[in-house]
Image: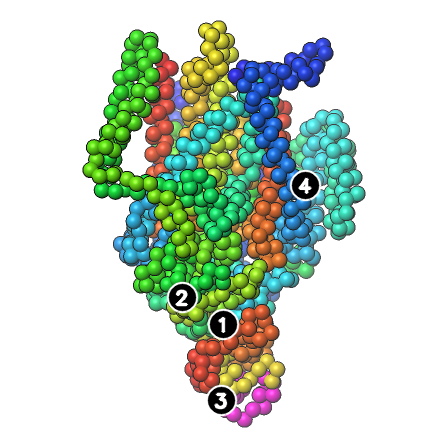
Amino acid sequence: MTAKAEVPPKRKVTPLVLEWMKDNLLTPWYNAVITVVLTVVIFVVLRAILRWALYEATWDVVLVNLRLFAVGPYPEEAFWRIWMSLGVVSLLAGLSWGVWGGRNLTPSAIVGVLGAVLLVLPVSSNVKWPMVGILALFILAHLASMGRTGFRRPLVWGWVLSFFVILFLLKGLGGSTLLTSVPTSKWGGLLLTVLLAIVAIVASFPLGVLLALGRRSELPVVKLFSILYIESVRGVPLVTVLWASAIILPLFFPKGVRVDNLIRAMVGMTLFSAAYLAENVRGGLQGVPRGQYEAAYALGLNYYQAMRYIILPQALRAVIPAIVGQFIGLFKDTTLVAIVGLLDLLGIALSVIAQPEFIGLQREVFVFIAAIYWIFTYAMSYSSRRLEARLGVGTR
Amino acid sequence: MATVPVTEHTRPPFWRDERVLTVVAQVVFLVVVVLVFTYLYNNVQAGLRARGLTGGYGFLQQRAGFDIGESLIPYTADDSYGRAFVVGILNTLKVSLVGVLSATLLGLLSGIARLSPNWLLRTLVSAYIEIIRNTPLLVQLFFWYMAVMLKFPRVRQAVELPGPIYLSNRGIAIPWLRPEAGFPVWIGFVVAGIVIGLIVAKWRTNYEERTGQSGYPIVAALVTWVMFAIVGWFIAPGTPATVAKPELNGLNFQGGTRMTPEFAALFMGLVVYTGAFIAEIVRGGILAVSKGQREAAKALGLNDVQMMRYIILPQAMRIIIPPLTSQYLNLTKNSSLAVFIGYPDLFFVAGTVLNQTGKSLEVISLVMASYLSFSLLTSLFMNWYNQRVKLVER
Amino acid sequence: MKRFTLSVITLVVALLVITACAQNQATPTTAPTEQTGAVTEQPAPTPVPTKQEQPAAEGSLLEVVKQRGKLICGANANLPGFGYLDQEGNYAGFDIDFCRALAAAIFDDPDAVEFRPLTAKERFTAVQTGEVDVLIRNTTWTLTRDASVGMDFGVVTFYDGQGIMVRKEDNITTLEDLQGAAICVTTGTTTELNLADQMRARGIEYTPVVFETADNTFGAYEEGRCDAVTTDKSGLVSRKSLLQDPEAHVILDATLSKEPLGPAVLQGDPIWHDVVMWTVFATIQAEEFGITSENVDDFLNSEDPGIRRFLGLEGELGENLGLTNDFAYRVIKNVGNYGEIYDRNLGPGTPFELPRGLNDLWTRGGLLYSPPFR
């Protein structure tokens, strides 16, 4: 039953459609039955879905609230900061693709097509032009940097720097007029979702690596502590961690100190994510052959040097796909911040379906945001698979 | 790890002696950890005191005062907070247990179907897996609840299926047994039937292994059990149970048993979501069974189903069990999302208790400890099972 | 290798920045007021008040609020008429106006307030943890909350009672008709407890369907998940206007409980508590005096010693509270008296048209009664 799945359809000199159908749909006899039944089911279901999506659904609820879905109540006069942040990301992405992706014009072409489509679409001009600019930036950066492998190091630094620049840009500064401070209660929608996921994964990285090293440490106290932490956190649901961090964290500080809601959610997600990251990294550490450790110590390196120059570089390289996978999970898990009252993409969706003029349109809203989440996570898991292939992880 | 044998004249001064350093490092680490924890603990205590909140678990005996929509044990507002907690824990266990079983079944079938030679089936299942895995569970739960369950017809216009089974946005009402006088006796027979059925199964399996003849252990056990149930039905005094049919009485369905839309949504959401992940695990496990096994099975003349049942799945199980365990744990933990759609699970009840009492640390510690024990118990069970599967390998 | 160094450095910096962020959020910013060139250390978590004329105010939340330059008010974002986001995304409503009145009393600026939307469930934690300075979010004053949840109440802004809304087509007129009903209710409220008590007292079997947010509760009721929905009557009136067909629903006459709604502050801070209480009393007293935001300036020439004291023209009533003497004037001028606040949000001309009922001056048969300003 399963044997044929691994074998791609055989290429014959005359690839006949009938042949393919016979192999894949009609033999043995019960497959023919399955095919017929499924065809009917798929036809009925698809027709119902399409009819709903095209004729019955009221997509106004999405169109009217697009801005809320994208950035939540972020003030309109500060939108340029979001555009600028996107520009920075687009620039860096273009450069990275050029530097690492080799001489391949496809990404630019795809982005170009996207831009062209955008130009034609009836989008309001204060969204259209910034978007087109950002896409153009990508193409320019990509074309300019193609194949220049020397840029790799500065680029990594660029990404690192951009993280802080963007956070600063979005937050602003109290007291200044150009970059007025935007309180975090005004961050929302997809913007907040993406920020939460990125901050949590970046911030949990050092903690996760330390915990992984601790778990493999030969010092019993450190090892016990790491195991306790990792296993307790992995044993409880994220909502309880978020809840605890929302309720207990402020108690750690003296009276009168106010810890922002968003910060508390970020701390909760970071602490949670660190335990899972530690397990991923531990997997990588276990994958490093014992000879490497022995060789490192034989060279006279101490523990720190051995980890820093020999072991971790190999271990981390091996777990990149796992970390990407964890990031995808984290991206989906950001929905749980609704429990602490943050307006992430799902939070916005819930408030939109409560709008009196759009009562009863839950399906449209949920289908829409599910599609957004799907696009993001699918794109990430797709690139992760590509990355995996490129890094040759698992083949060595 | 790589210590060179240290002789007298090469021994370094103590501040560079690795053995001394490890001890020192650990002591320092321990002291730091203890200090940090003491500091935080004191802060919390001081904070709670300053806010007029006193600690202690004594409140668990106080009257709860709130009602809970569905419960496996009798519960009223007059019961204690402690009992409310138990209600929540049982509700969590209920949805987790049923969910784990159903998700395993769905995952197993989807995993196998994804490798089917039938292109249409394969593609359909792949689409299911890719869509479900790449969208957040919480969004799916809201979808199941608000966009599916609550969109069922209102209770007056409930859809009637044969049975009668009624579908409405109050849930699904199905006929159920109503215990009568002889019920305890009959239940005793049913339980005895299960026990003896198991013994029979064991005996038939042994026979099968000893002789190589088919012993039909499962069939034999089932027959034993059914016979016990039937005999018990007639031996019990009076009728052990009657079938109660649900009927619309006043505002809601009375009689029979009802599955609330909250439970149904949570159940569907968890099963469909976890099933997609399990399907991928099953697929990986099956693909990992070497091709030679398959060819050998074919050569023996086994058909596809037999090959799956006797050759591939038993071997795939070894690879499948560990990741499957973590999916079971995930499902249990994810059941805490019930709070968003109003199913009174542990986390939900704890939230209400916290809100009515203000005992934040106590309630949170109870919740965390409960989930940790669930995880631990599941892990232990699965490890035990894994050991058994390993033994079968020989 | 290099990648590793890079990542480590990144992460260390990341952590630093995040802690810095947290710091930034955590410490009440004093930046705008600090103009001395020599930047001293970060302000200590509990800000040490500078020279103050009222030594009594030391260590009080009032000082923290003054230093911060704005009030943080725990509010409802989902209850039209009381606390909600209007079309432009600004907070508005009856409760919101009392937040603004408080800001006006302290800063003479009704906009010096940041609203923090809270669910029923998280509201007390938010006060306990100091996340909000004051909770003005249709919160019922009960003994438990006053005594063991760590809140301090003291003044009622709205006298309410719990009610039940049902569909007209169900022909339910009394609580007894609700036998076997499913009733939607929001968690973390006294409503949930009152419902249990009342139904139990009457021996009525019912199924509670409990939700986290009022949006979900009323959404589920509207879809027909429940036969009835219960919350404060004012909330029912406000929510009813948002239902798809408000005419198809009816609010039962029965009142399940007394619901005195008022602001809550953290227990153990009498100074801050007084400020909140007397700001509310000022709006009530102003209505009694007949002072409105429009004619308040005319009263500055008043001869009546009671009014002169009230407006801060005589005596030191305000300074004794830790505010300025004209705090009542500021409140009335910026926000208005109780009657104005009521009419603006709930009275005639609004979709709710709630009669004043108990929420009228004691002189007109209501329960509003301000202790004397002297």
- In terms of sequence position, does the residue under pointer 1 or pointer 3 come before the other? 1
Label 1 – label 3 distance at C-alpha: 31 Å
Dots 1 and 3 on the same chain:
yes
Question: How many residues crowd mark 3 within 10 Å: few (<14), some (14–19), many (20+)?
Answer: some
Dots 1 and 2 on the same chain:
yes
Q: Which residue does the numbered mark 2 point to in the structure image?
A: C174
Q: Amino acid at mark 1?
A: Lys
Q: Residue at x 40, y 55 (%)?
A: B250
Q: Which residue does the numbered mark 3 point to in the structure image?
A: C306
Q: Quadrant of residue C159?
A: bottom left
Q: Which residue does the numbered mark 4 point to in the structure image?
A: A89
Q: Which numbered dot is residue C51?
A: 1
* Residue A30 visible in the displayed image: yes
Residue C212 placement (x, y as % from top left): 46, 54
Magenta-tinted stretch? C296-321
On-image quarter of the C terminus of chain C: bottom left
Q: Residue at x 53, y 30 (%)?
A: A322
Marks 2 and 4: which is nearer the front? 2
**Chain letter of the residue carrying label 2:** C
**Chain letter of the residue carrying label 1:** C
- In terms of sequence position, does the residue under pointer 1 or pointer 2 come before the other? 1
Marks 1 and 3: which is nearer the front? 3
Q: Amino acid at mark 2?
A: Thr
Q: Is residue A27 above or below residue B47?
A: above
Residue A24 placement (x, y as % from top left): 61, 18
Residue C198 placement (x, y as % from top left): 35, 63
Label 1 – label 2 distance at C-alpha: 62 Å
Q: Element at badge 1?
A: loop
Q: Is residue C299 magenta?
A: yes
Residue C126 placement (x, y as % from top left): 45, 59
